[in-house]
Image (spheres, coloured by chain):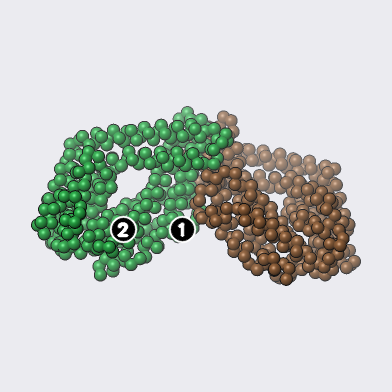
Chain colours: A green, B brown
Amino acid sequence: MTDALGALATPAGPATDRAATAGTAGEALAAHLAAHAASFLRGLPSIEPRTLRRVAGALHTFDALLDLAWARELRDELLRLDTLVGQEQAYTRRLARLTTALDSLACVDSDAAPGAPKARALLERQLTLARSRAHSLALQELGSARFHAVADRMTLLASDLPLRLPAGSAPARALLTHAAAARRRLAEAVAVLPLARSARPYNGDGLHLPDEDLPWREVRLLALRARYAMEVCAPLLGPEAAGPLAGLTELGRLLLRHEEATDAAEAAALAGATARITPATAYVLGVVHADQRLEVEAARHAFGLAWPELHHPDWLSDSWFTR
Amino acid sequence: MTDALGALATPAGPATDRAATAGTAGEALAAHLAAHAASFLRGLPSIEPRTLRRVAGALHTFDALLDLAWARELRDELLRLDTLVGQEQAYTRRLARLTTALDSLACVDSDAAPGAPKARALLERQLTLARSRAHSLALQELGSARFHAVADRMTLLASDLPLRLPAGSAPARALLTHAAAARRRLAEAVAVLPLARSARPYNGDGLHLPDEDLPWREVRLLALRARYAMEVCAPLLGPEAAGPLAGLTELGRLLLRHEEATDAAEAAALAGATARITPATAYVLGVVHADQRLEVEAARHAFGLAWPELHHPDWLSDSWFTR
């Protein structure tokens, strides 16, 4: 296994797979983390947020195998960085979502809504400004000592993963137990969602139910974490990993749609509260806000329909992970 | 049958049923029209719009049995009167629908939407004013020579229905053919609706598809007419009429919901275009408008699901009517 560990600093590939399918849980985890750390380092100075989330997710799910304080600290740093560099892209997507929706609103299509062009210009101005600020903050971060410390840790992560014993020296399949726990935490969080109501279309939740977005955001975090945990286990599972990964990816897609719609609705509301805009502009922003809240409701509905199907297959049962 | 015809000026009841289940199509139609004309006259000076629509609907569906010019003229007068006296009630329902929706909007529940109380007050002011105007117009109409002419015709209708021969002297079951034709016209109009799209929830039609309300209004008219035609045939059918009547009543309910939501959305848009309102008020009215358009979409969805079920039963097939 020494050879395999030596190969960890190289990109993910056959060497990594070899490391993961044999040896200890610690070695398999190290192989996975090293591959993504290498990908992170190769990509600099640009940063792919998903790489950060993948490493952070693995540090979270498999922290029983790691020095806990070290894992938590690096995880928190990576998530902070993810937020910083993810914002710019999020604002770009938010603006695209809002202007696309605005342009296709039937009620603002004609002279009936003279506020539409101004509403569009206002959203563009506010979100472009927010994006520029996010860009500056990200640039500033990339030049900071704090970022260099993270990069250093990512370099070390490949060769010096601080494993905890004896958990780290358990057989590689022990990783499946932790992935199963991540799946269970997801299922527990979903159990709290009002899925029966969401599965009924046009239930009015999007606009008429307050303070219901946070549990859905939490579920998205847990779905991502479950997916990244499954990715760590993928080399152990071979082709069998494809089903679970596709299912968790689909859940993540639905929950991202939910989150982006809630954020876009809030952006429309904020724009609507801008001082000294015309009533016509505010009216259109109210329509846009409601339209995005409808998207929120639609995403919950889609999730409510998809979850039982994606949740019940064998691969999400505890026995699948531990057979 | 002379006895039965003599009973026509009295309220609907056993005598009417007797008249309808025997004799000619003309006698059965006369019995039905006379019962509703009597109900109209008894109710004066207050007017039940549904009675007007029932008589007008029967005059339309069964006009092959009647003097055509006479039937069309009275029908148009009754529908004009229906519009006049129905407006007041429509404004009352529209205001209730809008304020109920507004009060339950999560986004205007707090300090976040300072425009909510003003939006509510504006809707109340505008719709109460419209209702008062409708009330005055209706009162004015009730004192007009034109209305007295209609009332006179309704009195004569009971005793002097101008039947056309030989259609009027066909057996009573001939009425079923005309009811079947009314049902067919409904099915033809529904065939033009984008039902496959409507049956998909959250299709965005409510807010993102322009100029789609009119075909739905037309379908509502035809569904009402099909139901009133079935009511004329009910004495011929006995308990068998219950299924068709319930089905058509349900369709009418869904289509009324659609129509009231489109009207409410328009009222919110009109309020939003009021001069010199605050942006905060306009914003809330934009949300209310979009919420009502969502109701439009939900009503279409419900109709899209209900129609195949209500349309396919035996009782809506041509053979059911003509067996």
Q: Residue at x 45, y 41 (%)?
A: A100
The answer to whether any part of residue A29 appears in the image is no
Residue at 13% across / 56% down in the picture? A4
Give the quarter of the figure containing the N terminus of chain A.
bottom left
Which of marks 2 and 1 precedes in the sequence? 1
Q: Where is the C terminus of chain A found, in terms of image quarters?
A: bottom left
**Real-space CA distance between mark 1 and mark 2, rounded to the nearest whole angstrom:** 23 Å
Q: Amino acid at mark 1?
A: Ala
Residue A255 location (% of width, % of height): 38, 52
Chain of the residue under label 1? A
Q: Is residue A30 left or right of residue B200?
A: left
Dot 2 alpha-carbon crowd within 10 angstroms: few under 14, some 14 to 19, many 20 or more: some
In front: B125, or B176?
Answer: B176
Q: Amino acid at mark 2?
A: Leu
For disc 1, the marked residue is A199
> Residue A191 appears in which quarter of the rendering?
bottom left
Image coordinates for residue A297, horizontal then vertical, percent: 46, 51
Residue B289 visible (yes or no): yes
Residue under pointer 2 = A245
Q: Residue at x 61, y 41 (%)?
A: B267
> Which element type, helix, strand or loop, lies under badge 2?
helix
* Residue A152 point in image, percent of width and height: 15, 43
Q: Nearer the viewer, residue B261 or B320?
A: B320
Residue farthest along the front direction in this orientation: A14
Which element carries disc 1, helix, strand or loop? helix
Q: Is residue B265 left or right of residue A77?
A: right
Give me the chain letter of mark 2: A
* Residue A168, quarter of the rendered image: bottom left
Image x and y of residue A296, in percent: 44, 49
